[in-house]
Amino acid sequence: MVWASTPQFPGGGTDLELWSDDDNDARVRQGVWSAAYNVLNHVQDYVSEELKWPWPRDPNRARTFMPMPMVSIENGRLRLGYGEADRPTLELESIDLADIADGIGGDLARSDD
């Protein structure tokens, strides 16, 4: 569960269950992608609401431009950030899918989307 709340922003959260399905790891991988996207989206909403302007800021774009969350699964890793995949405004450290799989069971690193 990811939850954010301030006096100006009463709060919001996202709660996604991930489970292993030996016959459908693609569905689990989609769940991981969706969970990551939702977390980034909620964090962005929270920070932007607190700052009163779009976040993160891309110095090459208008101040009102807000880069969207960017999530991809590449080479067995979950890539996270904001902006375009080939030129992210902000990129977080990628996460090894095997580390996620250890927590939920399954073999998420078999193929890349």
Image (spheres, rainbow, N blue to C red):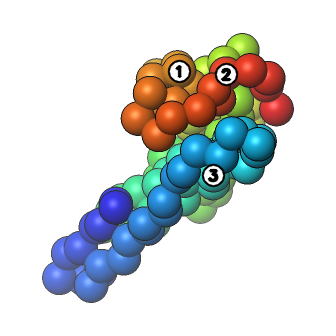
The answer for how far apart the CA atoms under marks 3 and 2 are is 14 Å
Q: Are marks 1 and 2 in contact (CB under 8 Å)?
A: yes
Residue 85 versus residue 48: which sits nearer the camera? 85
Numbered mark located on residue 31 in the image = 3
Residue 22 versus residue 16: which sits nearer the camera? 22
Residue type beneath disc 3: Gly
- Name the secondary structure under disc 2: helix
Q: Residue at x 56, y 25 (%)?
A: 97
Residue type beneath disc 2: Ala
Residue 66 occupies quadrant: bottom right
Q: Residue furthest top?
A: 75
Q: Which residue is mark 2?
A: 109
Looking at the image, is mark 1 or mark 3 earlier in the sequence? 3
Q: Residue at x 53, y 21 (%)?
A: 98
Within 10 Å of disc 3 (Cα), the crowding (few <14, some 14-19, many 20+) is some
Q: Residue at x 27, y 85 (%)?
A: 10
Numbered mark located on residue 98 in the image = 1
Q: Is residue 7 left or right of residue 15?
A: left
Q: Residue furthest left?
A: 7
In this view, 71 is above or below 1: above
